[in-house]
Amino acid sequence: MKSLLNKIKNFLRCPLDYSAQFELSGGVFICRGCKKEYGIRDGKVIFDHPPSDVLVCTKRNPIDKTKWSEWRAANFEYLKSFLLEEEKNKILIDIGAGTASFRELTGSFKTTIGIDFYPHEMVDVVADVTKPLPIRDESCDIVFLSNVLEHIPEPQPLLDECYRILKPRGYIIGAVPFLMQIHQEPYDFNRYTDFMLERMLAHSGFERTRVTSLGTPLDVYRTMQREYFHILLNKQLSVNIFKNSVLQFAIRFTRKITYLFTRIYKLFPLLSSNRYTEGYGFIGYK
């Protein structure tokens, strides 16, 4: 663990003294400039204490692809198209790493550092990503930002930080949902069109930006369909009328018929659409 922490140390900067370096002593990181100490817990450097109201799902294995939604699978395929053949000696910073569902891709690099405001298993640095990142200027080749921007109340400063920590010719890559249910309450703040993503990336200085629709209108329909029946059968059972077994049977029968028609719809080719999409993948270069 000490060797890993020493490796991480080379990429960190103190939030209070940007020019100072760290030293690892007595189980804490100490800023050589301001002398501020930052604790280490379970191999993770703690810059900020995580909020107490974070909902953490522990029921599913995050890397079990058989349990992934269409949206998560589409994310993986998009990100894989860029990262799978990338040079493995590069340095990747995974911001908002979470449970690291895509560690098959991010973990294949020479150095991968995960940052999140909650100490998930694969997180190396616990920090509030709405603040300036505790990462040195021009220290990484790739910034990985998957399903994070929707959880940032003011995203532009974070994109500015991503640009700052990237080396020249490095790039940012990620994905965001669009027509998707609210999740990870109360930390779901925004949805972005492709126009807004391009605008924000350009504002931070990124060039050769490209935003790609992930999914088709049918994917959106299927997601909303499942959510509708889930609410109907599970969220409204306290209403007396929904306790009627005959009505419940009718709802379940309707769901089966509806799902059958959805399978038939899949026989007809339908291209992706920027107007009706579950979300977008994006990339931009420094």
Image: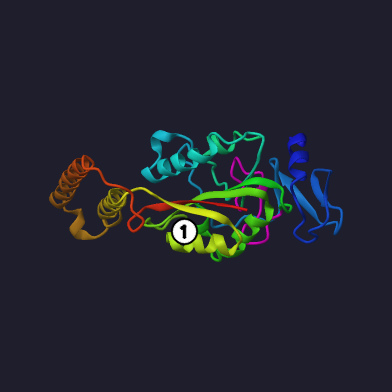
Which residue is at a point 32% across and 56% down the rendered structure image?
276
122 drawn magenta: yes
Q: How far across and down, in percent of the image, does residue 45 sit?
A: 71, 47
Q: Quick check: 2 left or right of 77?
A: right
Q: How far across and down, in percent of the image, does residue 166 sit?
A: 66, 51
* SS of the residue under disc 1: loop
Q: Which residues are magenta?
A: 117-134
Residue highlighted by disc 1: 185
Which amino acid type is marked by label 1?
A: Glu
Which residue is at a point 39% across and 34% down the rendered structure image?
66
Which residue is at a point 85% across and 59% down the rendered structure image?
34
Quarter where residue 162 is shown: bottom right
**In-front residue for pair 260/108:** 108
Q: How far across and down, in percent of the image, does residue 269 sit?
A: 25, 43
**In-front residue for pair 173/231:** 173
Look at the image and tell me whether residue 38 can be seen: yes
Which residue is at a point 27% across and 54% down the rendered structure image?
228
Q: Quick check: 1 left or right of 97?
A: right
Which quadrant of the rendered structure holds the N terminus? top right
146 drawn magenta: no
Q: How far across and down, in percent of the image, does residue 43 sit?
A: 70, 40
Quarter where residue 120 is shown: top right
- SS majority, magenta: loop
